[in-house]
Image (spheres, rainbow, N blue to C red):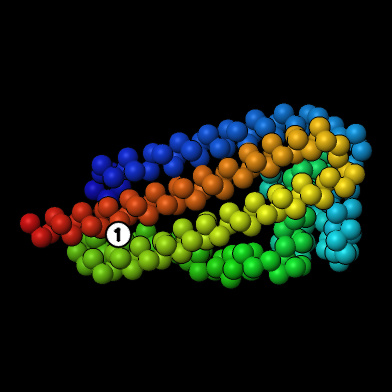
Amino acid sequence: MFWYDPTLIILLPGLLLGLIAQAMMQSTYSKYAKIRSASGLTGYLAARKILDGAGLYHVQIEMIGGELSDHFDPRANVLRLSKAVYESNSVAAIGVAAHECGHAIQYAESYAPMKLRGALVKTTNFSSTFSILIVLVGMLFAIPEIAYIGIGFFLVVVFFQLVTLPVEFNASSRAVAVLKGGILDEEELQGVKKVLTAAAMTYVAAFVNALFQLLRLLAIVSGGERGRRR
């Protein structure tokens, strides 16, 4: 069977890393979400201050639902902050808001990895939806060439996750640098670093998961070829 075979064990390290990273993120964010910043700035006010300081007066800030759903939308040039970040004056909220501001600044400066990631979005969406299906079709009809085409599409997913890493790490570096400018004190800044490091680990885990999934697909297809040759 395609989904129930010994190659499933290949996925275990990535799945385990993902669970650990997610647990670290939740616990670290929860801890620093309870610590209020001395400045009293909310996530919204901190983000507005950072954006205006970078000359990005035109970038709007909107409040959205969900938990840790914060993101910068380059298509609309809008920074969207979850209610918990938008309204809170916690160290965690300011750190997350500053990180998303880092993405807005990246976009304004045409930061190369961000531009590359943006260019890959449509292809990655297609690949993540259909690559496994293409591999499965190739295996069912014993046409390895089709299966390898599916693997080729999945490579796009892996590459997208790889490109995401410098984008996220750079945004966090920008956040820490700008928060040093009087928004947070040194002790608060250490808390932000821990929150952003934990968040970064979730992206590392996503890349590792995609990489191990690729290895599993290669093991399945190559194993099927060897089986037909016997």
Kind of residue indicated by mark 1:
Leu
How many tags in the picture? 1
- Can you tell which quarter of the image residue 108 is in? bottom right
Q: Residues within 10 Å of mark 1 (few under 14, many from 20)?
A: many
Q: Residue at x 74, y 45 (%)?
A: 96
Q: Residue at x 52, y 61 (%)?
A: 160
**Could one spot residue 62 in this view of the protein?**
yes
Label 1: which secondary element: helix
- Can you tell which quarter of the image residue 110 is in? bottom right
- Can you tell which quarter of the image residue 87 is in? top right
Would residue 181 be found to the left or right of residue 98 on screen?
Answer: right
The residue labelled by disc 1 is 136
- Residue 183 in the image: state x and y as whole percent: 88, 43
- Residue 120 in the image: state x and y as whole percent: 55, 68
> Which of these two is toward me, 44 or 50?
50
> Which of these two is toward me, 222 or 81?
222
Q: Residue at x 91, y 37 (%)?
A: 40
Quadrant location of the C terminus in the rendered image: bottom left
Would residue 24 be found to the left or right of residue 15 on screen?
Answer: right
